[in-house]
Amino acid sequence: MRFWAKRIHWYGALVFFMMVCAVFLRLYRLSDFTMFLSDQGRDAIIIHDIVTFKHFPTIGAPSSMGQVFLGPFYYYLIAPFLPLFGFNPLGLSVGVVILCMIGLIATVIVLKRELNKPTALLFLFFATFSFVIIEYSRFSWNPNLLPVFSFFTLYFFYRTITKKRVIDAIAWGIFFGLSFQLHHLALFMGGTMAVVWIFYFFKNKQKVLSLRNAAIAVGAFIFASAPLILFDIKNHFINLNNFLKTLSAPDTLAKSSVFQRIMDSNGTFFTNLLNIPFSAESALTILLLVVALVLFLLKKKKKIHLLITIHALHFVIYIFLFGLINIERHPHYYLTVYFSFFLVMSYLLIRFPIHNYIKFVVIGTICSVFIAINFPKYYFFKEVGNDQIGHSRRVAAFLSPKIGNQPFNIATWPVNFTEDNYTYFLILNGHRPLDRAKIEIANQMFVLCNQEPCEVLNSPSWNISMFGPAKIDKMWTFERIIIYKLVHADTK
């Protein structure tokens, strides 16, 4: 460590430089590229109702894993940023950037204190320039905060194991519960924590203390998850049943063996991490090299820090458990393990027992390759922005005078082209549509179509056909959107 000690005065400058880079990469041309589609529009409407004291939801959005509802924590956490930015939904994206950066700073502080400065610095490098981490920090969505909340779930679990303090057990349970509200796959962290806790329970002589802290953590988890639990009790455990059905539902993945699904799970992780295609075999090779590096350190009698052991186990167990279920492998499903992998790799590279100057060259080469792989993915440097917020605002402004002061319904075609992002700005303009879920039907419906042929009459979409027999009253084209005004047809 003498090599690093001679340069330790550079630590603060390098951390500051990388934090500046991290902020820049997450904010640069944010308004041009931030995602504002149906999920973001729906969330903006709900948050608007919260901050204007119209409605306080006790349940969150349905997750992408079937109709399994998340908790409302994300809405309340991000809500202050909407009025701070004058109800511009860009504020929600900026809020995510701010929260991610606060979490990243806190993570580096923890790693510096628990491990060492070089490991914290190398981890910060990977987290700063990783495209997948950047991408999921640039728009508002509940899973995007998972890297931070997952890290601190495992950190306070580690603290509970080592320090045995009540405050750490409470923090462990709360962060786990909040992570579970951000996305249900965070529950897989429980597998890692169960394995480590059982091992230390039988190793530890203070078993009563261990049981007490575990009970406190469970209580804190239940407290943080209370909205989800109460919702399920009130609705005959609909969330739990849908979750179990989703995990066991037959689909294309179910046609492969469990071993193949685990291999695919691991391969997709590395593909998403580096945004280059990895075969299952090449990804397995990388994983085995990491395992071999761990074994080599152990053979050299290099003690592995418990926090690193927990994160390494978390990565392996998560990949294994994820491979058991029959769902697609979207990049955001791995948000709980990206930080774990970066941390383990940083620690192993710093601890590898070779000459410090050779180590410097190896790490420098790896960092250069990492930048070379990720930099071409920074689309916001070279592409034309899609301005989804501006587009939604302009379409709503065009449509508002056509609505007038009359009640209305709104729908879209095709079905996967949804209206919540437009509806948000209509609400800001004083035009809130009737509630389709309650079968509230007005005398006019506006259908937005972005793909011809536009099936707006006798439509196979229930969202449109629920209006009843209809005829086209007027039609406009604006910003590549065809807008139809439907009125009830004379059925006499």
Image (tube, helix red, strand yellow):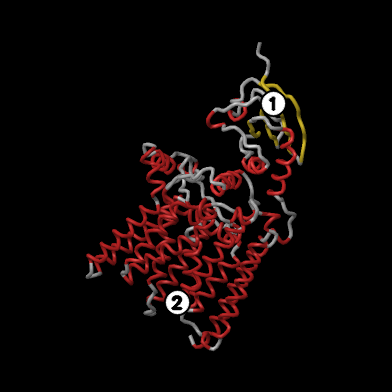
As shown in the figure, which amino acid type bears the numbered disc 2? Answer: Arg
Q: Earlier in the sequence, mark 2 or mark 1?
A: 2
Residue at left offset 65%, top offset 62%: 27
Q: In the drawing, what numbered circle is on residue 194?
A: none
Mark 2 residue element: helix
State the residue in front, 266 or 391.
391
Q: Quadrant of the C terminus?
A: top right
Residue at left offset 44%, top offset 39%: 249
The image shows residue 84 at horizontal and vertical percentages of: 61, 57
Residue at left offset 58%, top offset 44%: 45
Up-down: is 424 above or below 86? above
Q: Pointer 1: residues within 10 angstroms few (<14), some, or many (20+)?
A: many
State the residue in front, 237 or 192.
237
Q: Which residue is tagged 2?
A: 113
State the residue in front, 270 or 14.
14
Q: Pointer 2: residues within 10 angstroms few (<14), some, or many (20+)?
A: few
Q: Which residue is tagged 1?
A: 486
Which mark is nearer the camera, 2 or 1?
1
Image quadrant assignment for residue 245: top left
